[in-house]
């Protein structure tokens, strides 16, 4: 009968557990979500959730097994097929985590670079602000106090450094404040026994050969200009030595340069003062 004919082709194909799906008069498109099914041998079960991760099944076709992945929770990144992922978080570049730098290094003064030596999600707050050359210094989880010794730094990157300016003048260089924020404060200092200093250029060194006791050409060191004589250094420039003079005090007269004078009595003066 027509009714019996209508009852034909009503058979169904049903997927075998744990797969799901059925189709009438045709093979079923069986599916199996390995993230949610707890019975299949290849399923994730609680592998991901126990590690604080989420499970992702890219293809739920029942013939695509073992392709599920554990995915790290934001802001961590990382995934692993059919296993627990190794999660990472770069605290220098990630803007969302509570321990991240969030531009703190780049916004410091002076601007610094951020480095995260260990990006494992289990190692947090280890990022560092690192001073940019030619400055030096670093600090963990915060801006560094960058230093720049303008006397000793030889890098061409330092446009304010002394270089050999002081040394070429046989002088010593000092940087009173080595902070990278304090630049152009270096000075050339004269070497003993001369004195003098100048900022960012060679100093005009001086030495009074009459009073300085330590120089080999000085009157004070040689014991010249004894009692009754007066010493005078007409040019105190450190490169003008041996020009001091001894002048005899009245009523004697006499003078000598770089030696002891022979003082003689000025009888005219002696009579006028008597």
Image (cartoon, rainbow, N blue to C red):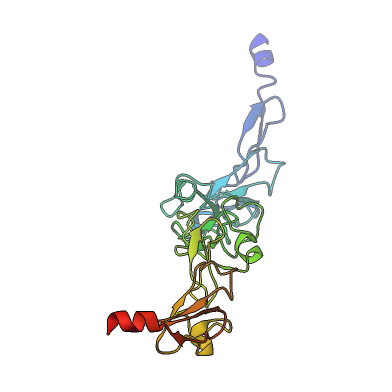
Quadrant in which the C terminus is drawn: bottom left
Q: Where is residue 199 in the image (x, y as percent from the top left)?
A: 49, 57
Q: Which residue lies furthest to the top in this view?
A: 2
Vertical comparison of 236 with 192: above or below? above
**Of residues 164 and 56, which is closer to you in this image?**
164
Q: Where is residue 128 in the image (x, y as percent from the top left)?
A: 51, 59
Vertical comparison of 218 with 5: above or below? below
Residue at 70% x, 24% y is 25
> What is the total number of numbered labels drawn onto the structure image?
0
Q: Position of residue 7 (x, y in %)?
A: 65, 18
Vertical comparison of 49 with 7: above or below? below
**Of residues 207 and 144, which is closer to you in this image?**
207
The answer to whether one can see residue 126 in this image is no
Q: Position of residue 62 (x, y in %)?
A: 68, 41
Residue at 55% x, 82% y is 215
Residue at 60% x, 57% y is 86
The answer to whether one can see residue 39 in this image is yes
Using residue 51 as the reference point, say whether residue 272 is left or right of it.
Answer: left
Using residue 59 as the reference point, say whether residue 99 is left or right of it.
Answer: left
């Amino acid at each position: 009968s027509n009714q019996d004919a209508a009852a034909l082709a009503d058979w169904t194909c049903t997927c075998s557990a744990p797969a799901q799906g059925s189709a009438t008069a045709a093979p079923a498109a069986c599916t199996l979500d390995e993230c949610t099914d707890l019975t299949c041998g290849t399923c994730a079960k609680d592998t991901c959730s126990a590690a604080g991760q989420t499970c992702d099944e890219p293809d739920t076709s029942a013939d695509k097994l073992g392709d599920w992945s554990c995915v790290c929770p934001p802001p961590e990144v990382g995934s692993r097929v059919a296993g627990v992922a190794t999660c990472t978080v770069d605290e220098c570049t990630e803007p969302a985590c509570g321990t991240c730098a969030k531009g703190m290094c780049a916004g410091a003064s002076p601007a610094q670079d951020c480095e995260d030596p260990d990006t494992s999600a289990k190692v947090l707050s280890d990022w560092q602000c690192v001073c940019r050359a030619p400055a030096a210094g670093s600090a963990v989880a915060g801006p560094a106090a960058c230093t720049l010794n303008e006397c000793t730094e030889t890098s061409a990157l330092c446009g304010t450094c002394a270089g050999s300016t002081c040394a070429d003048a046989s002088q010593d260089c000092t940087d009173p404040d080595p902070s990278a924020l304090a630049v152009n404060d270096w000075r050339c200092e004269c070497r003993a026994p001369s004195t003098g200093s100048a900022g960012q250029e060679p100093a005009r060194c001086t030495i009074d050969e009459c009073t300085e006791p330590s120089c080999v050409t000085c009157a004070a060191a040689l014991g010249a200009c004894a009692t009754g004589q007066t010493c005078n250094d007409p040019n105190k420039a450190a490169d003008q030595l041996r020009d001091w003079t001894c002048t005899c005090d009245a009523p004697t007269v006499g003078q000598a340069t770089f030696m002891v004078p022979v003082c003689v009595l000025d009888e005219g003066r002696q009579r006028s003062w008597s």
